[in-house]
Image: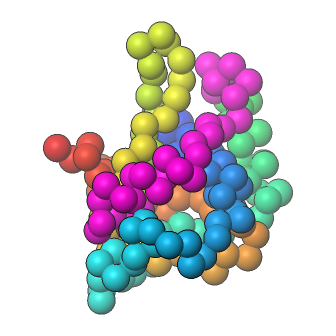
Amino acid sequence: MEKVKYFLLGGIFTATILLVFQSFTPGRVGKHCDDDQRYSQSEQAGGGKSISVQDANDFVDAFQSRFTEMNGRKGFYISKRAIDALFDSDERGNGLVCCPAYTSSGEISMVLCTAISDNSRATDNTTGVYITEGFCPNICGVFNQ
């Protein structure tokens, strides 16, 4: 049950991030958009699966009904500037790992870091919403240390 909880929480967070950033502007000048070192020749599927907005809402609602400790939270927000800073700090990072966390004040939150994986190819973005396909401990970023 614990694995399902974190799987759903990761999916909810990923969907939340992608809903917030579906208007990402390609071609922005900056290190975080320099993808030359980010993807390998052996890139494979597993970087995210495009899902419908309805499915995203259904998945979030299903999670909310099972895990009431979320206290009504449906997701977590982080700015694109913070995501840009993460990728600026890791020129090879080609994905994000989102780990559920309790803060020192007892709040439920997420900790994010970049990660490197050959499983970075995502399905075509038809809806602006993705669900995760990769999971830690296989792809963990700094959480491998």
Image quarter in which the C terminus is found = top left
Which of these two is toward me, 67 or 76?
A: 76
In the picture, measured across the screen, residue 76 lies left or right of residue 4, that is right
| Res. 31 in view | yes
Where in the figure is residue 122, as x and y percent of width and height? 53, 75
Where in the figure is residue 50, as x and y percent of width and height? 65, 69
Q: Is residue 135 above or below residue 66?
A: below
Which of these two is toward me, 51 or 31?
A: 31
Residue at image x 64%, y 70%? 25
What are the residue bounds of the magenta stretch?
67-95
In the picture, measured across the screen, residue 12 lies left or right of residue 54, that is left
Q: Residue at the front extreme? A: 29
Residue at image x 60%, y 76%? 26
The mark total stands at: 0
Where in the figure is residue 135, as x and y percent of width and height? 40, 54
Where in the figure is residue 12, as x and y percent of width and height? 62, 46
Q: Is residue 97 above or below residue 53?
A: above
